[in-house]
Amino acid sequence: MSDKVSDKIPLAGVIGAPISHSQSPKLHGYWLNRYGIKGHYVPLHVEQSDLKDVLQTLPKMGFVGANVTIPHKETVLSLADIVTDRAALIGAANTLIFRPDGKLYADNTDGYGFVENLRSNANWDPKSGPAAVLGAGGAARAVIASLLEVGVPEIRLSNRTRTRSDVLRSEFGTKIVVCEWVNAADMLDGVATLINTTSLGMAGQPELKLSLDRLSSKAVVTDIVYTPLRTGLLKRAAEMGCQTVDGLGMLLHQAAPGFERWFGQRPDVDEATRNFILSA
């Protein structure tokens, strides 16, 4: 047994308000146990008014990093000392690292998780054709940034409030083609990938009413929500013969880079991990 009293057990957590619904403690706890790592990952309910103080205090308590969720993902950018290019482009961070030099490092791994989910669970070539994105919120920003990064030639974007789509086009450039929400079904003609980033179809939300008549059966269709795992959109697309990918993998893959940085082990995102999260 070591007699070094300075040995610290690394701590990490997820910051949000509310936070009790988060699956992140369950996921990171599973990985810590799986790899025999002496560390802990906890849910941290933090109000907006306390965020700055909390971020200054956590490193003093032994925290090496944290995930950030609603409503803090945008605010942390102004509090960080170092912001990655992708976090700046998306306008939000979900992964924080408390560096030994005292600097707060902010990154966004949502887009990475989205792309890895598609690559792992579908025969997906991002360059094979246009992508259609439904929604223009924070998740859509991460999805669009990642699609452009991996070479999708065109992104057709539709949102219930058009002005939000226009803002994204002005920020991300001419590869974004904005379509009116009432005509969203028309933009599916010839797309290789269809992504729903809205809450429509999520448990407790209205169903997504979108005709898939013009969607090719060769398209890959994904929904970033994972409650329910098989949304109405994914069910209808699968019945047409499309490859479908649920949103759970995005949650799992976006968590992996942070875990590696905090605890020194790159975790496997595999069937065992997925089954554990799906278990009660």
Image: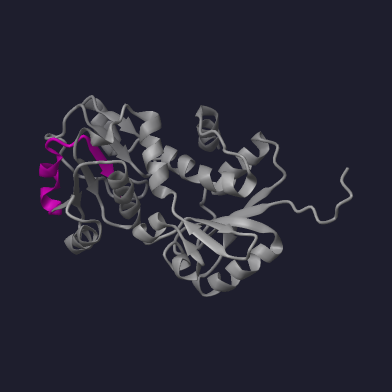
The residue shown at (44%, 57%) is 84
Instruction: Pinpoint residue 56: horizontal percent, then vertical percent.
Output: 61, 70
Which sits in the foreground, 102 or 234? 102
Please give the name of the residue rendered at 67% of the width and 49% of the height, measured from the top-left corner: 40
User: Residue 154, position in %: x, y?
Assistant: 19, 44
- Tell me if residue 175 can be seen: yes
Residue situated furthest top in the rendering: 241
Would you say 28 lies left or right of 155 here?
right
The quarter in which the N terminus is drawn is top right
State whether residue 221 is above or below residue 10.
above
Of residues 98 and 192, the one nearer the viewer is: 98
Identify the residue at the far bottom of this view: 49
Q: Residue furthest front?
A: 101
Look at the image and name its color scheme.
Answer: one colour
Residue drawn at the location 18% of the way across and 43% of the way down: 210
Q: Is residue 82 above or below residue 12?
A: below
What percent of the width, then of the height, locates residue 276?
56, 34
Is 183 in the magenta? Answer: yes
In the image, residue 61 lies at what x, y percent?
70, 63
Near-viewer residue (111 or 101): 101
Question: Which quadrant: the C terminus?
Answer: top right
Say whether residue 138 is magenta: no
Residue depicted at 27% across the width and 42% down the height: 195
**Residue extent of the magenta highlight:** 179-197
Say which quarter of the image contains residue 35: top right
* Residue 198 appears in the figure: no
- Please state the total of marks drawn on the protein image: 0
Q: In the rendered view, does 37 fall on the left or right side of 174?
A: right
| Image position of 203 (left or right of 170) | right
